[in-house]
Image (spheres, rainbow, N blue to C red):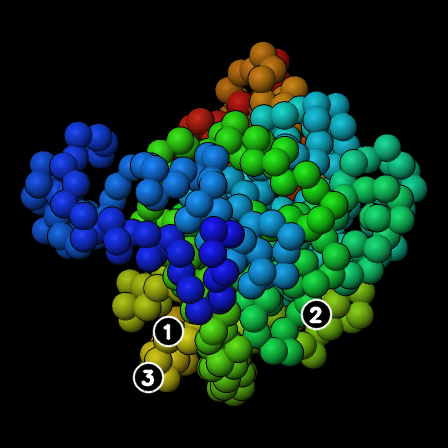
Amino acid sequence: MNRKHTQADAPLLEAMQEHRLNRVVRFDVPGHKGGRGNQELADFLGEACVRMDVNSMKNLDNLCHPVSVIKDAQLLAAGAFGAENAFFIVGGATAASQAMILTACKAGEKLIMPRNVHRSAINALVLNGAIPVYVDPDENKELGIPLGMSYEAVEQSILRNPDAKAVLVNNPTYYGICADIKRLAELAHAHGMLLLADEAHGTHFYFGEDLPMSAMAAGADMASVSIHKTGGSLTQSAMLLCGNTVNADRVRQIINLTQTTSASYLLMVSLDLARRNLALNGREMFRKTVEFTSYAREEINRIGGYYAYGEELCNGRSFYAFDRTKLSIHTRNTGLAGIEVYDLLRDEYGIQIEFGDIGNILAIVTAGDRALEIERLISALSEIKRIYGGDPTGMLNSEYITPDVALPPQQAFYAEQTAVSLRESIGRICCEFVMCYPPGIPILAPGERITEDIIDYICYAKEKGCSLTGPQDMKLETLRVVQ
């Protein structure tokens, strides 16, 4: 660092504040010139915001090659998160996960990973030609949701694929479920492999008390962390954390393959401020969050029909720990699909939750919420059950279908292909993604054989109103398959 900083400092913020006081004439980009060139934008976002939407310059450093204030801010972040190095990412945890995988694996090399990953991980394999070795997660049949990877399942995959370069772990899953990441890290390292963590939903693990173990504390080599989700930075801002086993200069080169050379200072300053806030106030923030979710779980379970689940389901293996900040709720026994409850909350009660799938909903709760809003959610769920609830007989339950991988993702994505109707696609090899978004976990990924169960699931999800994304045909009446 250029000077001794503490976690109470925010070096990038300080540089931006100093820059704001300088009456610099703008003959660089962005072309809105501090808002003067687009008054409507300035009116909408605020004059102060657009004045700080600036380009890289000597006194503000450069994210592609940080040597001063951005470097200092990243080093402070590394210290706060217990990492050797931290990289600011302005393309979300998607970009962080892809940089992590591109660092660990080259074309033709194997990556051991759970199939219930975010699409960004499989996208990375399409980009670099690495080969997935999928570990089927355990499943909770009653809830119909995938869990984490068990130690035994990962060990078997490693023994069958000793040439794999890394193991990727969700920490946590979208539903708040964690595997035993510390033991998995030890296992991977014992076999000469890296342990990578998708921590898009785990920022708070680094700062809260009595929460599941963070990836860096568990000994992971790299972790992609979506700071904006629960850490308080602006949407699209994230970090890539690295341990001392990884060449940070090489990681920076990999990041620069795909990350913009015009990084937003608004996003980067939000990361600097979020890190400071987390380091100074994180323990209290997440204590309050757990207080909210614990109360909400208890009250929602009193309604009946719904099941707001938690640590009682931990089995010491694939459901090793539960993220108590997550308000994950099973809805099927009310006779309503999760996506139906999601839509009703938004359309009838003015409540926007994170997602609804065919059997569950997830509400993201933070210290930024208010007790009155928690009560409003509980009351709305009670009314929805009373007014719209029914018999769950015949409802589809499972959120996870074991894939049949026929080709590597890259080979299938770029293969000669044709479009066929959904029913005609059964038995063919898919060339594209299909997923409900959120959460963005593929129902189908390139290279997987299409089965009748998958088509039934897609049709059911369409009927219930899930937002299905990924394929070229945005109406999802056809799928592209290998010719």
Residue 416 in the image, given as x and y percentages of width and height: 58, 12
Specify the amino acid type for callout 2: Ala
The residue carrying mark 2 is: 321
Q: Nearer the viewer, mark 1 or mark 3?
A: 1
Residue 147 in the image, given as x and y percentages of width and height: 69, 59
CB within 8 Å, label 3 to label 2? no
- Distance from the alpha carbon under mark 3 to that under mark 2: 29 Å
Left or right for 407, reference 279: right
The residue carrying mark 3 is: 372
Mark 1 is surrounded, within 10 Å at the Cα level, by few (under 14), some (14 to 19) or many (20 or more) other residues, namely: few
Residue at (68% x, 67% y) in the render: 213
Q: Quadrant of residue 415?
A: top right
Q: Nearer the viewer, mark 1 or mark 2?
A: 1
> Under tag 1, what secondary structure?
loop
| 349 to 139, vertically: above or below | below
Specify the amino acid type for callout 1: Gly
Mark 3 is surrounded, within 10 Å at the Cα level, by few (under 14), some (14 to 19) or many (20 or more) other residues, namely: few
Residue at (26% x, 41% y) in the render: 54
Residue at (78% x, 71% y) in the render: 315
| 432 to 46, vertically: above or below | above
Q: Quadrant of residue 26?
A: top left
The residue carrying mark 1 is: 368
> Under tag 3, what secondary structure?
helix
Specify the amino acid type for callout 3: Leu
Left or right for 208, reference 36: right
Earlier in the chain: of badge 1 and badge 2, it is: 2
Nearer-the-camera pick, 384 or 272: 272
Quarter of the rendering occupied by the C terminus: top right
Earlier in the chain: of badge 3 and badge 2, it is: 2
- Say whether residue 5 is visible: yes
Residue 472 in the image, given as x and y percentages of width and height: 44, 27
Nearer-the-camera pick, 122 or 232: 232
